[in-house]
Image (spheres, rainbow, N blue to C red):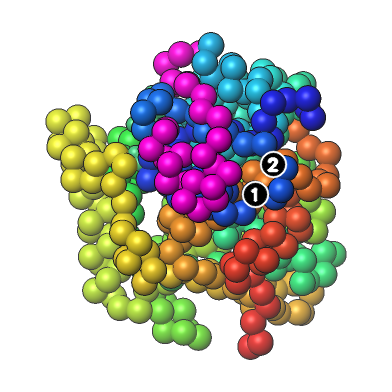
Amino acid sequence: MSERQYDIVVFGATGFTGGLTAEYLAAHVPDGCRWALAGRNTTRLEAVRRRLSSIDPACADLPLLQADVTDTASLRTVAESARVVVTTVGPYLNYGEPLVAACAEAGTDYVDLTGEPEFVDRMYLAHHETARRTGARLVHACGLDSIPYDLGAYFTVGQLPDDAPTTVDAQIRANAEFSGGTFASALTAFSRARHMTDVAKRRRRADPRPADREIRTPSGPPTRDSETGRWLVPMPTLDPQIVARSAATLPRYGTSFTYRQSAAMKRLTTLVATGAGLGVLAVAAQIPPVRSALGKIRKPGDGPSAQRRARSWFQVRFTGEAGGQRVVTEVAGGDPGYDETAKMLSESALCLAFDELPDTAGQVTTAVAMGDSLVTRLQNAGLRIRVLDE
Ligand SMILES: NC(=O)c1ccc[n+]([C@@H]2O[C@H](COP(=O)([O-])OP(=O)(O)OC[C@H]3O[C@@H](n4cnc5c(N)ncnc54)[C@H](OP(=O)(O)O)[C@@H]3O)[C@@H](O)[C@H]2O)c1
């Protein structure tokens, strides 16, 4: 692997989140890191490179690799030239698989930003075994989906005994806007609810939970938190599945682990409006012409401005209980979907490229592949991952 030409290649830097990721790397790669940008349009890549050279003049020489998801050979070249490939080319259900396949075949570590459960399950079924054979670590969901939850739960159980039934309750609050790419991914996922359920079933058959552990991720109707008075709405996102996979693999979660995740809302009116909005979107996404009209509301490449992102924030508050002990922790920071996501994705890539990590391969979660090293990196990079005094 050390003979590969690049330590890290970023695929998708011409897009909104990929651009922020490339900017983060330009400011933070260690001396001697060999990295490159890949994309389908060289003129756009050159424009990104010019922007990066104002952050670090050395970026003026960044190599540019021409690659398109419809050109398998170009992806093979990218995968074979890199130790770690970072991709922000999404919706991943539409564009993601050829690069996962190329990285699995080439034994190349891979990180992405997907929040699409169907994509993760499909990639497990199609490429996990190949990656285990070649040694590639395929780490999905290295952004807001699902690092705060996966590492937050990992950090929380680390404060508790591992020989007693453990519960972790995560509540997220945030104030932020989304990009064109995120909106497109959400529409794609909504339009494929039945496929998602079918693929999840196939995965459960191929990847059963360990028989010697009980892992639960219950959800139910919205409830009111008696401590904070907030309305808690269970989130049917990828995150609980990722946390459950970490819990199925690592001893620190104990043999009986329960994880709940909800969005916390102050007002009942916000809860009703959010539920109604998502309901309408889910129904509208089933009708192809309406879906394509909705897709034009936020165009690819669009995203919240730097000023809007500077006002954005998120906090995930975890309450963990085991063996009569209770701990409250948080993962919190600035703009969750883009600035902090670019940081989380970049630090994941740097962690895989340069840190001493447990020996893993195949589709692995961030907690399993990188655990403490990534927690430390993100803390050093300014994300708050800490125990709260309560
Ligand atoms: N889960 C999270 O926490 C999180 C947070 C942020 C974003 N995301 C996800 O990240 C993805 C990107 O979001 P975004 O807002 O950055 O999207 P975007 O601005 O639309 O960027 C998409 C990128 O994909 C590239 N692309 C499209 N088709 C391609 C092809 N055939 N070959 C090569 N490259 C191609 C585009 O290149 P061109 O410039 O050449 O068009 C562009 O660089 C989405 O799936 C979004 O859901 C997830």
Residue nearest the viewer, comparing 74 with 280: 74
Q: State the residue at coordinates (20%, 36%).
A: 291
Q: Give residue 221's position: percent from left, percent from top.
A: 40, 63
Which residue is at a point 69% across and 26% down the rendered structure image?
5
Q: Residue at x 52, y 24 (%)?
A: 65
Query: Which amino acid, by three-letter code, is at mark 1?
Result: Val
Q: Secondary structure at mark 1?
A: loop
Residue 160, by quadrant, is bottom right
Measured as percent of width and height from the top left, residue 181 is found at 34, 42
In-front residue for pair 268/307: 307
Helix, strand or loop at label 2? It is loop
| Disc 2 packing (10 Å; few <14; some 14–19; many ≥20) | some
Q: Is residue 215 left or right of residue 148?
A: right
Which quadrant of the figure shows ligand 1? top left
Is residue 240 positioned above or below 59 on the image?
A: below
Q: Quadrant of the N terminus?
A: top right
How many marks overall?
2
Does the segment drawn in magenta span residue 202?
no
In the picture of the structure, the residue carrying the numbered disc 2 is 33
Q: Is residue 246 visible?
A: no
The verdict on residue 70 being magenta is yes
Q: Which residues are magenta?
A: 45-72
For the C terminus, which image quadrant?
A: bottom right
Residue flagged by tag 2: what amino acid is it? Cys
Residue 297 at least partly seen: yes
Front position in the image: 358 or 378: 378
Residue at the image position 24 percent from the left and 41 percent from the top: 299
Q: Are marks 2 and 1 in contact (CB under 8 Å)?
A: yes
Q: How crowded is the residue under tag 1: few (<14 C-alpha within 10 Å), some, or many (20+)?
A: some
Instruction: Say which residue label 1 marks.
Output: 29
